[in-house]
Amino acid sequence: MSGVFGLLFGFAAGLIGVGGGEFRIPVLIYVANLPILIAVTVNLVIGLLSVSISFLRRFQLGLFSQESLWIAVVMSFGSIIGAYMGATLTGKLPVKTLKKLLTTFLIVVGFRIISEPLWGWSISKISLSEPILSILAIIFGLMVGLISGIFGVAGGEFRIPILMFLFGMDIKIAGTTSLLISIPTISSGLIKHQRMGHMNSYGVIVAASMGVATIIGSFIGASMVTEFSEGALKIILGLILILATVRMITKP
């Protein structure tokens, strides 16, 4: 069963540029019966495999630009710090408050992204100077990194809209850029969780079994990006954001 979920979530990761961690966590807790902290760590392991394979395949297909490289580097700087801090603060932050903020963000952004292909409400790039954009990239990288470290997710659901709205990237380039940023972000949180002892032998087995299926799904999803129009991908991303919101609200 975990292999089937791994394949599906990996496909979504490769296609959109997200890690799929928000949907994988319930499976790890309720299907694989992992304790929450170990589930978070296992989720990060599988997420790292997923985003790495997805990025390499999308990069091979030319879905990355030199212009977005500096954004990825700058945002990664903040994300690495944020993910490490988030892992350290696991269980110490007011999660209910954080959930409310994330829920509001996801709902607004989800409907905003869907509105463009459905009703023609175009998304315009915010015109800012490069130094200001660099500062904002670090700040948003730090924020998404915190989310990644606390919840054990890659953060693509939050990062891709930022890359689209703030830096004017199309959804395919934004997805690939997000995947690249996710690699050091997840690694940072994973290292801290590992050092805190949030892993056991059963967790390793679950990570390996679901990870193999996730790699396959990620490769297939990334290979199919060019077959989807930008409008279709925006609708899918918007729906993922809204579903992630529902999952966050219902998650105990």
Image (cartoon, rainbow, N blue to C red):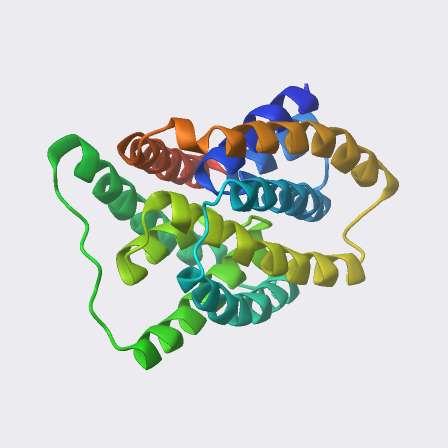
- Camera sees residue 251: yes
- In this view of the protein, can residue 90 be seen by the observer? no
Marks counted in the figure total: 0
The N terminus lies in quadrant: top right
Point out residue 183 in the picture as x, y percentages from the top left corner: 61, 55
Q: Is residue 158 above or below residue 50?
A: below
Query: Does residue 171 sit above or below 1 in this rendering?
Result: below
Q: Is residue 125 left or right of residue 101?
A: left
Which of 174 and 235 lies nearest the eye of the viewer? 174
- Of all residues shown, which one is farthest toward the bottom? 131
Figure quadrant of residue 138: bottom left
Q: Residue furthest left?
A: 120
At x 25% / y 42%, what residue is drawn? 113
In screen coordinates, is 112 left or right of 176? left
Near-viewer residue (232 or 206): 232
Relative to 71, 113 lies left or right: left
Residue 72 against residue 138 in the figure, above or below: above
Give 205 or 11, whichever is nearer the viewer: 11
Q: Position of residue 200 (x, y in %)?
A: 84, 45
Residue 96, position in %: x, y?
44, 53
Residue 221 on image: x %, y %: 52, 30
Q: In this orientation, which residue lies closer to the viewer: 191 or 102? A: 191
The residue positioned 39% from the left and 35% from the top of the image is: 240
Q: Residue at x 55, y 50 (%)?
A: 154
State the residue at coordinates (52%, 31%): 223
Write down the quadrant of residue 49 in the picture.
top right
